[in-house]
Amino acid sequence: METIEARRVIEALRTGVPSRAAVKSLGAGSAALERAFVRALEAKSETTGAEPILFQGPFGMGKSHLLLHWRSLAEERGFATSQVVIGPETPLGNPNAVQRAVAESARAPGTTGKAVKELAAVAPPGAAEALRAGAAKAGLGDRFLALLRVYETTQDEELRNDVLNDLEGRPVAVGRVRRALREIREADRYKFAAGSSHAHAHERLVLAALFCRAHGLRGLVVLFDELERLTAFGPRSRVAAYRELGWWRKVCNDPAMPLFAVFASADNAHHRFTDKGDTARVKALKPEDPETESVVLGHALFGTVQDLDPIVDDAAQLHALRKTVAEIYGEAYGFAPSDGDLTDSYPTIRAALRSWIARWDMERLAPGETGAIVTETLEFGATTFSDEELAAIASDDDA
């Protein structure tokens, strides 16, 4: 490893923010979870369904690190990927906000720009036609079938780009699409029935995955982080989030949909929601309500949660990791760190990494000086967001 790359790795570990270089250098634990993820990728590659993965672990135990590692694994296997952090700006119950975040973060293997635009620039012959056929087979509405037909036939590059913008969540005017259809004498083939913005967001997510497949990839993998933040949302927003989790479960299990999702949460997320009365709230929903099935299905996903294996509890893994990080530190700063006290215990892997680096900094910059590394647990604020506040923060424009 070259010095500059080694320094990037160490500085990423020091700040506690995972980077691709750090993940590549250190790998990731949780072998059982990784096997489940790889099996799911294989299932989606073979056009079969797969249950989305929900895993949990304490703060600082490497959830974000693992998601970044899995993102690389998915790209190596031919999937486009996107990573979304749940929060007030992207509440899971707002599919429009989530869809826009997915499009913004989506990357195709070997590229740096947004997946849709990057893939469109190197489209194989027949990609547009295959995409339209896949969308029709998936049951997408006429609005998007018309868009894809225009994209397939028009010679207007600006209009083609506007269609791609629509797929990313920035709608093109329906009147413009109608004019383009009239030019190819196909205006009567499509009915532009009014549809909900939430339904359009779902269709755009499906289209993104179909777009990836039509352009030579296996599909799209979306990795959601900080699912536990739903506990800070109002009750209606949490129920809406369960509805969306139910939609994701359905689409992941659909063999025809090249779309897969992973959800990472802090530990005991299921009990957090139960404590807020959500189990009773979901049971009280009316069976005849068309959204009830999805809400129940989404809420039940928490019953499938898997635990992240804590590396700090495995002495052999912890010592091996420390040796690897010490070698990278030595390359970064031309300094050989001491072995230190290998009997030290740490509450999280993040605390261990930052403690090691801080100790080696003192050895390098102030040799002979002594000092103690103090590790404390941060208590996060209990800020909550009402349903009204969330609606204002995450604008829900009709599309």
Image (cartoon, helix red, strand yellow):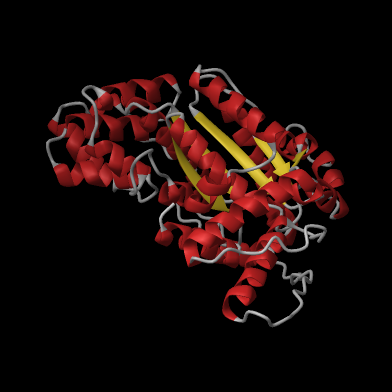
Residue 170 pos. (x, y %)? 36, 51
- Establish if 151 lies above or below 64: above
- Establish if 314 lies above or below 152: below
- Establish if 222 lies above or below 187: below
Residue 153 pos. (x, y %)? 17, 29
Determine the residue positioned at 24% across, 26% down. Answer: 124
Q: Is residue 91 visible?
A: no
Image-based side of 291 in relation to 268, left or right: left
Q: Nearer the viewer, residue 16 or 378?
A: 16
Q: Nearer the viewer, residue 11 or 299?
A: 11
Determine the residue positioned at 49% across, 67% down. Answer: 333
Residue 99 pos. (x, y %)? 48, 47
Q: Quadrant of residue 353?
A: bottom right
Image-based side of 95 in relation to 36, left or right: left
Q: Is residue 332 visible?
A: yes
Determine the residue positioned at 13% across, 33% down. Answer: 183
Q: Nearer the viewer, residue 203 or 61?
A: 61
Residue 232 pos. (x, y %)? 72, 62
Determine the residue positioned at 34% across, 26% down. Answer: 216
Total label count? 0
